Image (tube, rainbow, N blue to C red):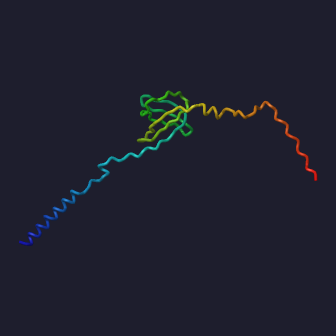
Amino acid sequence: MKKILVIALAVLMGVAFVTTVFAQTDKPAAATEKPKAAKAKTQTFKGEFVSTDATAKTLDAKNDKGTMTFDVSKIKKMPDFKAGDKVSVVYSEKDGKMQATSVKAVKAAKAAKKEAPKKDEKPADKPAATPAAPAAPAKK
């Protein structure tokens, strides 16, 4: 009778410890928590304005590397551009789309300054001054 009691007690304690172990296990954290989105890196695109699509809320711009399409749905006040205008688009890539955060016109004045001649330059109409006579050799 003692043997049966010891076996029954051992089985009962085994079941009690096993159930508490299962109750204490944590569920995987990845399944319960939402994955944190990595902060998107912002980039700047400078080029020429091509077109805009009001229904799809997209803007197309091109530069020497190619044409890019930007999602401008988050921009509250979209400036009006003409084809060929110089634009600067600040964007970040999100879900495979280029999400524009800022669209600005690049002023043509900067480009005009670079092309304008400097004030210090002399006009080509004046003849060049005659060179000075060579110095006489020193006497010994």
Say whether residue 133 is left or right of residue 101.
Answer: right
| Residue found at x 91% / y 49% | 137
Say whether residue 108 is left or right of residue 36.
Answer: right
| Residue found at x 41% / y 46% | 38
Say whether residue 5 is left or right of residue 127.
Answer: left
* Displayed quadrant of residue 8: bottom left
Q: Nearer the viewer, residue 90 or 64?
A: 90
Percent from the top left, x then y, of residue 52?
48, 30
Which residue ends up furthest to the right in the rendered image? 140
Percent from the top left, x then y, of residue 76?
43, 31
Q: Nearer the viewer, residue 90 or 59?
A: 90
Q: Is residue 105 above or below residue 93?
A: above
Q: Nearer the viewer, residue 114 or 138?
A: 138
* Displayed quadrant of residue 73: top left
Percent from the top left, x then y, of residue 138?
91, 50
| Residue found at x 57% / y 31% | 107
Image quarter (top left, top right, bottom left or bottom right) of the N terminus: bottom left
Q: Is residue 125 above or below residue 132?
A: above
Which residue ends up furthest to the front in the rendered image? 140
